[in-house]
Amino acid sequence: MTQWAQLRSWAPQNQAALEDWLSRFTFIDAGWEAARTWGRISAAGKSRGRAYPINDTRIAACCLAESPPLATLNTKDYADIAEHHGLVLLGREQNAP
């Protein structure tokens, strides 16, 4: 988002508003624990014949390492990781009647 604002030459007050808005969110550290978790879930998937896309496993690993649920509209992309690794998913499917 910051890159987008910079490339479009947002005025300083708009950039400050963006920073204020972003400060309301929790950001996950993609550190060593997330890297180790990525290695474990990626290897386990490959061992079961289910290679996960790298971006999906990076996102899932960060959530698993830091413990927040993953909010996504693509719960089917993460269903196998949730089933085998305990990833908690929040998405449209859970809220459907």
Image: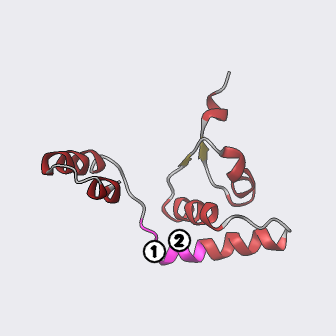
* Vertical relation: 75 (above or below) 39: above
Q: Amino acid at mark 1?
A: Gly
Q: Which mark is residue 75?
A: none
Q: Amino acid at mark 2?
A: Ala
- Mark 2 — residue? 34
Q: Position of residue 50 (x, y in %)?
A: 81, 65
Q: Position of residue 18 (x, y in %)?
A: 25, 47
Q: Position of residue 29 (x, y in %)?
A: 42, 67
Identify the residue shown where x is 62% and y is 29%.
95
**Does 72 sit left or right of 16 as displayed?**
right
- Mark 1 — residue? 31
Q: Quadrant of residue 35?
A: bottom right
Magenta segment's dominant SS is: helix
Is disc 1 placed on a helix, strand or loop?
Answer: loop
Front residue of this view, candidates 5 and 79: 5
Identify the residue shown where x is 74% and y is 53%.
83
Front residue of this view, candidates 69 and 1: 1
Residue numbers of the magenta segment: 29-37
Identify the residue shown where x is 53% and y is 65%.
65
Q: Residue furthest right?
A: 49
Between the C-alphas of marks 2 and 1, the distance is 5 Å
Front residue of this view, candidates 1 and 58: 1
Question: Mark 2, residues whose alpha carbon is within 10 Å: few (<14), some, or many (≥20)?
Answer: many
Please give the count of numbered marks on the rendered protein.
Answer: 2
* Vertical relation: 35 (above or below) 59: below
Is disc 2 placed on a helix, strand or loop?
Answer: helix
Q: Are marks 2 and 1 in contact (CB under 8 Å)?
A: yes
* Vertical relation: 18 (above or below) 56: above
